[in-house]
């Protein structure tokens, strides 16, 4: 059976907000129980990354309107229903098609790197004419 790919909303969300597996795991940790405020150390224990990196990811998601910070920590509270739905679709996709999600994350990075490289490539001027 051919792979139909990921839903468009998931592909767009990955492109806009997720640059690595760490990004994905930090977000999925906080969204795993939306009623709970997660401290950075609790997220760190789940993600097993560096403390400073987890803190940066949390702040990025706050700035993106995906999570909010309160006295106890961070909790999932997207600023729009579209963001909520995209995260819900991403969560399902990651449970059902983990490899495809990982491929999409890193495929997007390769495309971005290629596009940046091409933007700065010097082209030889045509000497004819």
Image: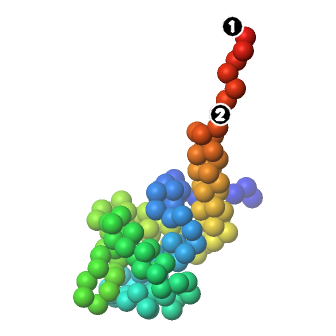
Residue sitting at 65 percent across and 54 percent down? Answer: 110
Instruction: Report the disc number at residue 129.
Output: 1
Q: Position of residue 15 (x, y in %)?
A: 51, 56
Tell me which corner region of the image, top left, top right, bottom left or bottom right, holds residue 125: top right
Is residue 56 in view from this perspective? Answer: yes
Q: Nearer the viewer, residue 3 or 90?
A: 90
Q: Disc 2 marks which residue?
A: 122
Q: Position of residue 67 (x, y in %)?
A: 34, 74
Q: Quadrant of the C terminus?
A: top right
Q: Nearer the viewer, residue 39 or 75?
A: 39
Q: Is residue 128 above or below residue 95?
A: above
Q: Residues within 10 Å of mark 2 (few under 14, many from 20)?
A: few
How far apart, in angstroms, are the residues tagged by discs 1 and 2?
A: 19 Å
Residue sitting at 34 percent across and 82 percent down? Answer: 74
The residue tagged with tag 1: helix, strand or loop? loop
Q: Residues within 10 Å of mark 1 (few under 14, many from 20)?
A: few
Q: Quadrant of the N terminus?
A: bottom right
Q: Position of residue 77 (x, y in %)?
A: 31, 74
The residue tagged with tag 2: helix, strand or loop? loop
Which residue, as the protein is rendered here, is positioned at the far top?
129
Residue sitting at 63 percent across and 71 percent down? Answer: 98
């Amino acid at each position: 059976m051919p792979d139909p790919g990921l839903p468009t909303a998931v592909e767009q969300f990955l492109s806009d907000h997720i640059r690595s597996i760490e990004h994905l795991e930090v977000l999925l940790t906080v969204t795993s129980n939306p009623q709970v405020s997660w401290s950075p150390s609790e997220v760190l224990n789940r993600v097993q990354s560096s403390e400073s990196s987890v803190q940066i990811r949390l702040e990025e998601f706050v700035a993106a309107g995906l999570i909010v910070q309160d006295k106890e920590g961070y909790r999932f509270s997207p600023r729009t229903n579209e963001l909520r739905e995209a995260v819900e679709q991403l969560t399902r996709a990651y449970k059902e098609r983990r490899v495809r999600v990982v491929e999409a994350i890193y495929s997007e990075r390769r495309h971005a790197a290629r596009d940046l490289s091409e933007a700065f490539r010097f082209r030889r001027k045509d000497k004819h004419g």
